[in-house]
């Protein structure tokens, strides 16, 4: 059997077809039923880094740094509550009457395990932040009016948004449509995770799973044949290994991972053999789906937007028209979000039945982005208009 590295394939080497294989684990470390995930780490890092940048900005502008701690609390609470309620209201309203406890409970009871909040919506977070900062500005001293606070905060929101989307990438969620282009990504980590969880009694059966491209075959309609090498734990019998290959693999692909693998090929073919140390290993051939890495598109865009807005603040902070940065942020971010939705798969089944625009259903994310863009245009025009009046008055 072919020997492969035990490290996950994150970006496969350049070969004949330049798609990428993502086999990174979404979990950093596990403690019983609790797991620390990359998504949660990136989410927290967004706020921690933003807080330090906010300290820097307040010092440069001569504002009281003690207000940063209060502002951070407002931001964290409003983001989590707004994002969670936004997801439930916009994408999964049935949860309110079917399972209301799961709206804010980050764990399941049977069996008990920590899950985190399964589903957060950026539009809900935006609404929550706008409302919370309005409350904050009402209680602050003069010199921290609502729009000025927004001008500073959206710079940090762009950076936090980039980290959150990177967390979505680790989770293999918010995936894009299939593509034959070289920039496509094949998300295989869900299969790896599922196979490594296969057990019999109290024994784990699969030690690791690695992947290798078949360079003689090009993607067709986004479908890419791959070899997956399944390495079993020492002591697993041939019968147990074949049971995993004959039943578990096909069940996992057909019932849980149809958005990542083409299941029309039927039963997955495999070859089973033994390594030199006596453990069993198998080579299976799966038809994976290469998809647009929509999460990375948005993450990169957010980083560039952060650099643009921070650059504007750095250069013009003393003479910055109130609302200018907020207006630019709203227009750029939500316009890009509207456009990226054309490359994404729907987040809820009902989106497939929405009105068709340019051969594509108009997703909920696009509908919610339109008013955000309009608000940005209004604020930007007003900011530029007020700035022109101020310049005319000073002449």
Image: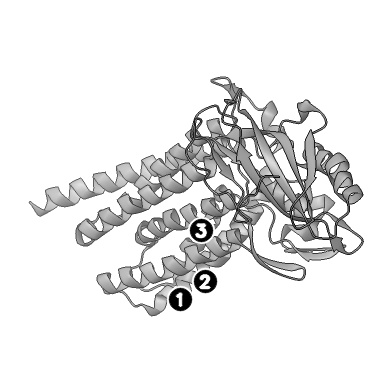
Callouts 1 and 2 close, C-beta under 8 Å: yes
Count of numbered labels shown in the rendering: 3
Q: State the SS at label 2.
A: helix
Q: Residues within 10 Å of mark 1 (few under 14, many from 20)?
A: few
- In this rendered view, identify the residue nearer to me: 133 or 265: 265
List x then y, in percent, for residue 64: 34, 78
Q: Name the residue that disc number 2 marks.
A: 73
Residue at 55% of width from left, 60% of height from top? 79
Which callout, 3 or 1, points at the residue further toward the start of the chain? Answer: 1
Label of residue 23 in the image: none
Q: Quadrant of residue 351?
A: top right
List x then y, in percent, for residue 41: 56, 64
Q: Residues within 10 Å of mark 2 (few under 14, many from 20)?
A: few
Q: CA distance from mark 3 to mark 1?
A: 16 Å
- Specify whether 190 is left or right of 16: right
Label of residue 69 in the image: 1
Q: Name the residue that disc number 3 marks.
A: 129
List x then y, in percent, for residue 139: 45, 72
- In this rendered view, identify the residue nearer to me: 234 or 385: 234
Name the outermost residue toward the left. 395
Q: Residues within 10 Å of mark 3 (few under 14, many from 20)?
A: many
The vertical placement of 49 against 371, above or below, is below
């Amino acid at each position: 059997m072919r020997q492969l590295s035990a490290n996950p394939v994150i970006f496969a080497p350049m070969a004949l077809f330049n798609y990428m294989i993502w086999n990174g684990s979404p979990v950093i470390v596990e403690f019983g039923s609790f797991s620390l995930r990359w998504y949660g780490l990136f989410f927290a890092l967004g706020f921690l880094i933003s807080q330090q940048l906010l300290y820097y900005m307040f010092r440069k502008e001569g504002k009281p740094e003690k207000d940063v701690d209060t502002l951070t609390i407002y931001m964290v609470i409003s983001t989590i509550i707004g994002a969670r309620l936004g997801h439930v209201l916009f994408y999964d309203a049935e949860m309110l009457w079917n399972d209301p406890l799961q709206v804010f409970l980050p764990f399941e009871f049977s069996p008990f395990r920590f899950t985190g909040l399964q589903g957060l919506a950026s539009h809900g977070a935006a609404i929550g932040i706008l409302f919370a900062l309005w409350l904050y500005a009402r209680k602050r001293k003069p010199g921290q009016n609502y729009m000025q606070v927004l001008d500073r905060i959206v710079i940090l929101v762009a950076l936090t948004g980039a980290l959150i989307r990177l967390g979505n990438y680790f989770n293999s969620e918010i995936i894009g449509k299939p593509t034959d282009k070289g920039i496509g990504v094949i998300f295989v980590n869900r299969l790896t995770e599922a196979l490594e969880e296969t057990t019999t009694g109290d024994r784990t059966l699969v030690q690791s799973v690695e992947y290798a491209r078949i360079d003689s075959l090009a993607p067709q309609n986004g479908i890419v044949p791959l070899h997956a090498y399944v390495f079993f734990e020492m002591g697993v019998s041939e019968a147990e290994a074949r049971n995993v290959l004959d039943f578990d693999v096909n069940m996992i692909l057909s019932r849980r991972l149809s958005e990542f693998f083409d299941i029309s090929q039927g039963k997955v073919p495999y070859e089973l053999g033994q390594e030199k140390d006596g453990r069993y290993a198998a080579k299976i051939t799966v038809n994976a789906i290469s998809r647009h890495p929509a999460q990375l598109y948005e993450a990169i865009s957010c980083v560039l937007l952060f650099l643009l807005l921070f650059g504007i603040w750095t250069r013009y902070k003393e003479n910055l028209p109130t609302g200018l940065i907020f207006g630019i942020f709203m227009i750029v971010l939500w316009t890009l979000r509207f456009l990226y939705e054309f490359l994404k798969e729907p987040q809820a089944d009902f989106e497939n039945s929405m009105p068709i625009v340019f051969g594509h259903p108009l997703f909920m994310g696009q509908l919610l982005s339109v008013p955000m863009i309009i608000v940005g245009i209004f604020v930007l025009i007003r900011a530029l208009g007020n700035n022109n009046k101020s310049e005319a008055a000073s002449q």
